[in-house]
Image (tube, grey):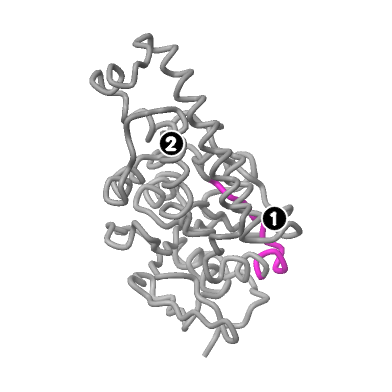
């Protein structure tokens, strides 16, 4: 049976601009750090996998001196860990407020996959409490409980390294040919491809202009049917899946079927293809 694996930030909800960025900046303010990231600066930071890793880009000798930080590497690591713990608290409060909506179609697709018997998972290099807060926001408590969550520092190397997806496959007991990933960034795509996975991309706030060569499908979102209609725009469909105005589970099953050269039959979908 195929499995459906979601990235978190940018896929389940478009959280970077209105969630992570203000949480980073509020953390910097609370700790008295002489930095505030602009939207333009943060658009570059999101290409770095992991919040602690983004924070560590600050630690030039000049910044360490200006902020009065210790120069001992172990002590600096402790400071970054403390900053990141606080940032995660701030961020999860933002998500808990409900101010950031789920992305179109994610709960619909996950519900269809669950009804079809597909295992569900999230694989993200964000902190696990952050991932779980977004997952519950996007899916609701009952469906979220059906997900396996692989997040944070369970692997040493963050995306674009394939480690988080390889870890998820191992824990789920799956072959790469049995899972399809939904990502939103080039780093995430490279991680999925490195693990041998078929990957569909739904572009997000900071990723629309990235290079998604190698993706099995690239769309603006998964979309939704009426009455809350959100029509997706297909940006790349190299396998000729031909999704309609919104992506359905059968489209994702077709990606797996096409990716393995048609050797396996497409899995049945509980969700009809739109016309």
Q: Residue at x 33, y 70 (%)?
A: 236
In this view, which residue lies farthest toward the top?
Answer: 72
Q: Is residue 117 magenta?
A: yes
Task: Identify the secondary structure beneath mark 1.
Answer: helix
Question: In the image, which is nearer the foreground, mark 2 or mark 1?
Answer: 1
49 on left or right of 43:
right
Do labels 2 and 1 touch, CB within 8 Å?
A: no
Give x and y (percent) for residue 78: 48, 18
Q: Residue at x 51, y 41 (%)?
A: 126
Let me know if residue 167 appears in the view: no
173 on left or right of 156:
right
The quarter of the displayed image where residue 171 is located: top right
The first of marks 2 and 1 along the sequence is: 1
- Against 23, is 157 above or below? above
Q: Is residue 98 magenta?
A: no
Which quarter of the image is occupied by the N terminus? bottom right
Between residues 77 and 3, which one lies in front from this camera angle? 77
203 on left or right of 98:
left
- Against 63, is 17 above or below? below
Label 1 sits on residue: 144
Between residues 152 and 38, which one lies in front from this camera angle? 38
Give x and y (percent) for residue 267: 62, 69
Question: Which span of residues is magenta-colored?
Answer: 112-123
Task: Identify the secondary structure beneath mark 2.
Answer: loop
Label 2 sits on residue: 158
Q: Residue at x 60, y 86 (%)?
A: 227
């Amino acid at each position: 049976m195929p499995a459906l694996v979601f990235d978190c930030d940018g896929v389940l909800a478009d959280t970077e601009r209105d969630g992570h960025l203000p949480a980073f900046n509020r953390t910097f303010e609370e700790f008295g750090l002489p930095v505030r990231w602009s939207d333009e600066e943060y658009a570059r930071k999101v290409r770095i996998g992991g919040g602690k890793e983004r924070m560590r880009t600050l630690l030039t000798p000049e910044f360490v001196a200006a902020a009065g930080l210790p120069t001992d590497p172990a002590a600096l690591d402790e400071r970054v860990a403390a900053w990141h713990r606080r940032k995660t608290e701030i961020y999860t409060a933002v998500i808990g407020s409900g101010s950031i909506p789920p992305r179109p179609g994610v709960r619909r697709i996950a519900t269809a996959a669950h009804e079809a018997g597909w295992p569900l998972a999230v694989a993200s290099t964000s902190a696990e409490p952050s991932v779980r807060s977004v997952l519950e926001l996007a899916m609701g408590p009952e469906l979220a409980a059906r997900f396996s969550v692989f997040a944070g520092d369970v692997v040493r190397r963050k995306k674009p390294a394939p480690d988080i997806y390889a870890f998820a496959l191992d824990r789920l007991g799956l072959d790469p040919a049995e899972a399809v990933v939904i990502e939103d960034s080039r780093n995430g795509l490279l991680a999925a491809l490195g693990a041998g996975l078929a990957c569909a991309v739904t572009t997000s706030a900071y990723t629309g202009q990235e290079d998604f060569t190698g993706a099995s499908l690239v769309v603006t979102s998964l979309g939704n049917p009426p009455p809350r209609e959100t029509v997706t725009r297909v940006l790349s469909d190299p396998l000729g899946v031909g999704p309609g105005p919104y992506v359905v589970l059968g489209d994702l099953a077709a990606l797996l079927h096409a990716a393995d050269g048609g050797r396996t039959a497409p899995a049945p979908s509980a969700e009809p293809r739109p016309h």
